[in-house]
Amino acid sequence: MRAASMRIFRQILPLLLLLLAACQPSGEKPAADTREVVDMAGRRMRVPVTIERAYSTRPGSVTLYAVAPDLMVNRSLWMTDGAERFMSPAYLKLPFSDGSAEEIVRLHPDVIISYFSINRQSIDQADRLSQRTGVPVFMVDMEMKRYPEAFAAMGELLGRQEQTARMSAYLEKWLLPVFAKAARIPASQRKRVYYAEGNRGLNTDPSGSFHSQIIDLVGATNVAQVSLLSGKGMSAVSMEQVLQWNPDVVIVWTGMGASMTTFRNITGDPLWQRVPAIREGRIHQIPYLPFGWFDRPPGTNRILGALWLAQLLYPDLYHIDLEDAAREYFSVFFHRDLTAAELREVMHPLALPGVDRREVANKLSGHDETSR
């Protein structure tokens, strides 16, 4: 009798195992195929041992592209005109998705990487997103001084330690020395900078905003004394305020891309000529290929922006070879070796085709006949 029972049990055992597997909730992996990780907010979660598909929320696409472009399942950022040729064909084919839970679920990521400021609000948002999608949300702090930690965390999460080590080595070579020197600049010797945003240049972000963080980090003073707006920022200001602040240097945002509408409007507006920095030619267009070097997105593209602004403001202090820095940055962070022509293009937006350099020079020198 016992022998017959054992035969029956052996016969139905495979069926029992199949039933148990079918009862396992869809989308969940057996514990043996997962591992515990801790994100930069101190949140613990389980992720697959090997992550094969990663979703990035805004503005993390640039950073995830640097670490593991082959794992990306989405794009979350629009590029300026002409930027496509600097990105891989595989990246350009990715669907554009900007955080909808339904879109995320359809893309079947193993993990969602939330790249933003870490605070109570963003932590709650990450928790809600994970609950709605059933996908772990790994938070990465976008604060520039925490880049070494951020790169290490992403390398460990995605199994790309070798690549993130290259990224960290770049920081140690180029960016961290800037931070160290900036901290030693006396307040009385700091250049005063106005960050001109918006169509007419009469929007800006004050000190303390991640949109203008680079100004503080390179040892300059942000002249804007306005309320800090969360999210997209861009506080409105008046020409009278700009005149009162009297900046040493004006830098122009990249939101208009190759049209450089803001730069053209400022240099062609007689009212702006009342500002000494504009009248004397101390206005500079921030480079913007393939993404703005200064902001929007506030991703790792800001590394180049920090080097650019540091050398622009304090050439005798930093001694940065911007061509070498840009060439190496593109190789490490964009996986692309620039030609000599491409290097000139990304570094000198005012020299791009379609930009009348004589017109710009005339406007800056106050000899623009078309405005008379």
Image (spheres, rainbow, N blue to C red):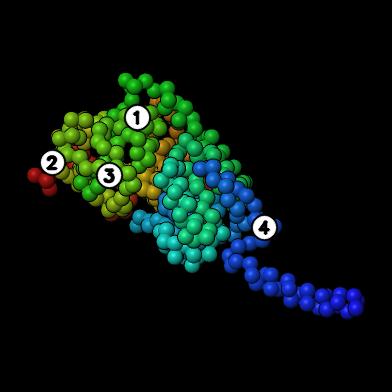
Query: Can the viewer see residue 351 in this picture?
Result: no
Residue topped by disc 3:
234
Mark 2 or mark 1: name the one nearer the start of the chain.
1
The answer for how far apart the CA atoms under marks 2 and 1 are is 27 Å
The answer for how far apart the CA atoms under marks 3 and 2 are is 23 Å
The answer for how far apart the CA atoms under marks 4 and 2 are is 68 Å
Mark 3 or 2: the one toward you: 3
The answer for how far apart the CA atoms under marks 1 and 3 are is 19 Å
The answer for how far apart the CA atoms under marks 3 and 4 are is 47 Å
Q: Residue at x 65, y 56 (%)?
A: 34
The answer for how far apart the CA atoms under marks 4 and 1 are is 51 Å
Mark 4 or 1: the one toward you: 4
Mark 3 or mark 2: name the one nearer the start of the chain.
3
| Amino acid of disc 2 | Pro
Residue topped by disc 1:
220
| Amino acid of disc 4 | Ala
Residue topped by disc 4:
31
Mark 1 or 3: the one toward you: 3
